[in-house]
Image: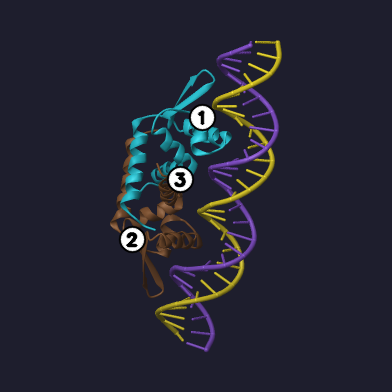
Chain colours: A cyan, B brown, C yellow, D purple
DNA sequence: ACAATATATGAACATGTATTCATATAAGGA
DNA sequence: TCCTTATATGAATACATGTTCATATATTGT
């Protein structure tokens, strides 16, 4: 097993290993939201949301669209949805703890 | 989407979001290894390996078997293998970066 | 041009967690 | 029993990263 590949996998998992980030992703999996919507829906500060969105942008996980003063975010592609769904499915099927 | 469920998912991802831990898991996916084998194969200190193994034990991801002075580790069940494989498959199919 | 609103961003700070260091425990051999 | 080897473990340390705080930028309305 090549270490380089495992490192990539590590980094993949890291993206989803933060609760607020994951909550944002799941919210976005339901549609298009502007930043203020995200902060109010999830009770995360505006700054924290923006920082997470910046990271998600850098990783190309979200798509950005400006409408006037507001900026809307959506998931970048259907692939992300599949990942989220797969994760959920996996958690649900084992009722540990 | 229930926050509690997402939190569980976060914790699931966290397990795999560390490089050395993941390398240990992939090594164990190939068979049974004692601690000293793991440290030499992966170039991680004995202590670091033991700490990671402790964590993996607590999460029931590995199975322990003592033979004399040595202690052998294996993955707890086939399910873990499937998770690892799925992750790899996912990484391989997208050639980002 | 100015004020108000929405979002982004850099730096400081807080926190979680992985590693190291020192040492403990357990087993086997002399 | 004493010594050696294998592994575990607690505490200290190092480090990565998420949040906050203060402020910048961008857009709209007046």
Determine which of the numbered discs, if any, sits on residue B61 in the image: none
The tag earlier along the polypeptide, 1 or 3, is 3
- Whether marks 1 and 2 lie on the same chain: no
Image mark 1: chain: A
Q: Position of residue C4 (x, y in %)?
A: 64, 21
In the image, is A44 to the left or to the right of B13? right
Q: Residue at x 32, y 54 (%)?
A: A94
The answer to whether marks 1 and 2 mark residues whose Cβ atoms lie closer than 8 Å is no
Looking at the rendered structure, the secondary structure element under dot 2 is loop
Q: CA distance from mark 1 to mark 3?
A: 21 Å
- Residue pointed to by mark 2: B76
At 33% from the left edge and 62% from the top edge, which residue is drawn? B32
Q: Nearer the viewer, residue B3 or C26?
A: B3
Which residue has dot 1 on it? A35
Q: Nearer the viewer, mark 3 or mark 2?
A: 3
Q: Secondary structure at mark 3?
A: loop
A89 or B42: nearer the eye?
A: A89
Q: Is residue A25 visible?
A: yes
Specify few, some or many for label 3: CA neighbours under 10 Å numbering under 14, 14-19, or 20 or more. many
Image marks 3 and 2: residues in contact by CB distance under 8 Å = no
Chain where mark 2 sits: B
- Judging by the rendered image, the residue that carries numbered circle 3 is A17
Q: On screen, A32 above or below B56?
A: above
Question: CA separation, marks 1 and 2?
Answer: 42 Å
Identify the image quadrant of the C terminus of chain A. bottom left
């Amino acid at each position: 097993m090549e270490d380089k590949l495992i490192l990539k996998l590590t980094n993949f998992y890291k993206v989803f290993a933060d609760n607020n980030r994951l909550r944002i992703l799941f919210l976005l999996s339901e549609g298009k939201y502007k930043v203020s919507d995200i902060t109010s829906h999830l009770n995360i500060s505006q700054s924290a949301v923006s920082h997470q969105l910046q990271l998600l942008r850098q990783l190309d996980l979200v798509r950005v669209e400006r409408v006037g003063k507001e900026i809307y975010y959506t998931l970048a592609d259907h692939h992300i949805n599949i990942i989220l769904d797969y994760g959920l499915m996996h958690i649900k099927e084992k009722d540990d703890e």
